[in-house]
Amino acid sequence: MASTFTSITLAETTPASADELAGRFPLTPNPHPADDDEYARIMRELRFGMDFTDHMVHAHWSAQTGWGQRETRAYGPLTLSPAATIFHYGQECFEGIKAYRHADGSIWTFRPGYNAARFAASARRLCLPELEPGDFEAALVDLVRADARWVPTGEGSSLYLRPFMIGTEPHLGVHPAAEVDFYCIASPSGPYFATGFDAVSIGLVRDYHRAGPGGTGAAKTGGNYAASLLPQQLAAEQGFSQVCFLDVTGTYLEELGGMNLFVVGADGSVRTPRVDTGTVLEGGTRHALIQLMKDEGIDVAECDIALTELVQGMASGEVRELFACGTAAVITPIGRLACEDFDVSVPTGELTRHLYDRLTGIQLGREDDPHGWMYKICD
Ligand SMILES: *Cc1c(COP(=O)(O)O)cnc(C)c1O
């Protein structure tokens, strides 16, 4: 059988303007939006992913009729059959993308076409129906326009958007759901790590893997996260804030389970684990950083990175910086990597700091955007 999913090939397309896309998910305003006190409290003490806006977007799909009813409606609990496939077989995929408020008050997002393409690729792997990129982007536009007051200002804060799709057919037989629902919810959020740009310590995991060859590691799906929770918990008990996973042979670095990895050498070389193994999620942040470094004349090697060599390099000083990246936390310096048989540290480096400033500079509209990544949602 031909392998069609060793890794995701992202066919990123350029979205139509927000004005053209707006209205695909018609708004029925929430009759009970958050009152002034609650709104002020939430926006004053921004947390990550714990408070939600007044609305959500929804579309229903059935195998017979395809995508049907679309709407933007009050945020609130869902009513689902206890037999819905999502509860039993985990048929699900999701995305994470942010809306930023610029100094002039306008609201923007970052490369929605990339996330739209990845959402479609994840859906294919999970046997879920593809949502056309224009609909994915329109969902973001309609939700953010309805909830514009929830897009915060301030360093490290944004409106975190969480599109997701679930199998909802009530049927315990194992088969792709014939009824599917797409939602997008939004959460006004402060920095992902309470400690801000401080370096984190990472526990290296040998006994657990988040993904394997031919599995779902390249798709953004909840099951991969479920597999990562136990090793994450065990590492947390030993004082680590995140874990790093290896490939199934225990030789090469893969990723943190929610963030991709970069290794900077003392000679200025930069490497990141390859994603064509199908066991690593190809991050949009990773992709953008590779491009930004290329713009500055730094060639990033996407390759196998052996753990033994990394540990030796960190001990000898040949590895100068180590960092992780993803939409939620942007860039997180890794200060320490440890396991039973080694414990090595590196200081937070200049390139890590520079890339953080450059990428957030683009996202917040403070710096030039040579690749046209920013997408305007509204004034
Ligand atoms: C979402 C995710 C990332 C980071 O992807 P971004 O597009 O940069 O946010 C990395 N690894 C996994 C497993 C993920 O789910």
Image: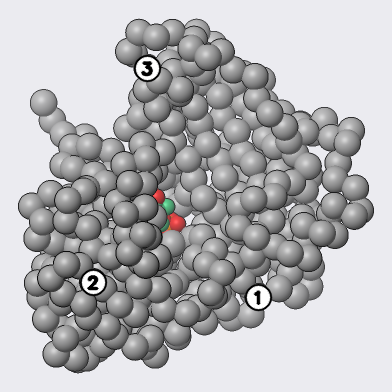
Judging from the image, the colouring scheme is one colour
Q: CA distance from mark 1 to mark 3?
A: 43 Å
Give the label, 1 or 3, closer to the camera.
1
Which badge, 3 or 2, is on the more N-terminal residue? 3
In the image, farthest residue toward the front:
237
Which badge, 1 or 3, is on the more N-terminal residue? 1
Q: Residue at (11%, 26%) from the top-left corner?
A: 1
Neighbour tally class for label 3: few under 14, some 14-19, many 20 plus, Cα within 10 Å: some
Check whether the beta carbons of the residues at disc 2 and disc 1 lie within 8 A of each other.
no
Vertical arrangement, residue 344 with respect to residue 305, above or below = below
Image position of 53 (left or right of 171) = right
Give the label, 3 or 2, closer to the camera.
2
Vertical arrangement, residue 23 with respect to residue 377, above or below = above
Check whether the beta carbons of the residues at disc 3 and disc 2 lie within 8 A of each other.
no
Instruction: Check disc 2 and report its element: helix, strand or loop.
Output: strand
Neighbour tally class for label 1: few under 14, some 14-19, many 20 plus, Cα within 10 Å: few
Q: Position of residue 317 (x, y in %)?
A: 19, 91
Image position of 207 (left or right of 156) = left
Q: Residue at (86%, 41%) from the top-left corner?
A: 33
Image position of 59 (left or right of 284) = right
Q: Position of residue 324 (x, y in %)?
A: 36, 69
Vertical arrangement, residue 73 with respect to residue 334, above or below = above
Q: Is mark 2 within 8 Å of ligand 1?
A: no
Check whether the beta carbons of the residues at disc 1 and disc 3 lie within 8 A of each other.
no
Instruction: Check disc 3 and report its element: helix, strand or loop.
Output: loop
Q: Hey, which quadrant is residue 217 in on the image? A: top left
Q: CA distance from mark 3 to mark 2?
A: 41 Å
Q: Position of residue 279 (x, y in %)?
A: 23, 48
Residue identified by numbered label 2: 338
Instruction: Check disc 1 and report its element: helix, strand or loop.
Output: loop
